[in-house]
Structure formats: structure tokens, C-alpha cells
Image (cartoon, rainbow, N blue to C red):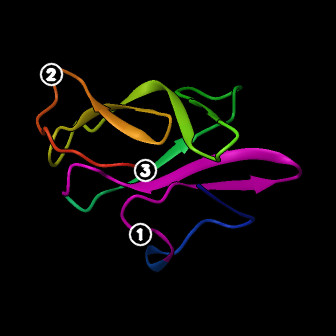
Amino acid sequence: MRFMDRHPSPSDLKPGVLVVVRGGGQKKWACFQCPGGCGNRFQLSLNQTRRPNWVIEHDWLGRPSVSPSIHQRDACHAHFWIRGGRITWCPDSGHQASGGT
């Protein structure tokens, strides 16, 4: 997990890396490549006043956990959780691969 003060460029988003965009001392966005391999980019809002929104936490090793699950409704139809820096695929996911974020 990396922190940035601006939205990451495509070259900033490497497979398995989650970037948290901060501003004004607040976490605003979680950005990462789809772990399903389709190449799509996720930008999850961490703003609790907007819908939908997600919560991101990290353990003492910096491994992220994201809640709720993330569901890619286009492209590869990936549906997964990020827990402790690992991808956990949901049974209804269109893609079953291993990997970490």
C-alpha cells in the first residue's frame, strides 16, 4: 500500500499495489488495478458522505483490508475482498485467480 497526494497515473498503478489518495489529512480514494487481469482500474471512494463508499484499514505491516467487497460488473466480472493484503474471491466472481494487493 502506498500513499499519494494526487490521483495515480497509470504508470503508478502496478499489479498488486494499492494506492491511497490523501488530501487535507483525509483518505479520499483507493486506486488499484483489477486483480482479475482485465486491466481495469478501480477508484474506490473513501469519503463516508458519498455513496457508494468503502473503508480501508491496514495492519502493522501495512497490508490493506477493504470493506465492503469490490464487484467489477464489467470486463472480467471479478468479485472479491481485500483482507490483510490478500485477494479473497467471492463464489459469484467471474474470475478465480490468486494474488495480493
Residue drawn at x 40%, y 40% is 86
Mark 3 closeness class: few <14, some 14–19, many ≥20 residues within 10 Å: many
Residue named by callout 2 = 92
Disc 3 to disc 1, C-alpha distance: 10 Å
Q: Secondary structure at mark 1?
A: loop
- Check the image and report above or below for 97 versus 2: above
Q: Secondary structure at mark 2?
A: loop
Residue drawn at x 16%, y 49% is 75
Residue named by callout 1 = 14
Camera-near label (3 vs 2) is 3
Left or right of 39, for residue 83: right
For the magenta stretch, what is the residue range? 12-37
Mark 1 closeness class: few <14, some 14–19, many ≥20 residues within 10 Å: few
- Residue 70 percent coordinates (x, y): 37, 32
Labelled disc at residue 101: 3
Mark 2 closeness class: few <14, some 14–19, many ≥20 residues within 10 Å: few
- The first of marks 3 and 2 along the sequence is 2
> Residue 55 sits in which quadrant?
top right
- Check the image and report above or below for 2 versus 29: below
Q: Nearer the viewer, residue 71 or 82?
A: 82
Disc 1 to disc 2, C-alpha distance: 26 Å
Q: Is residue 25 magenta?
A: yes
The amino acid beneath tag 3 is Thr
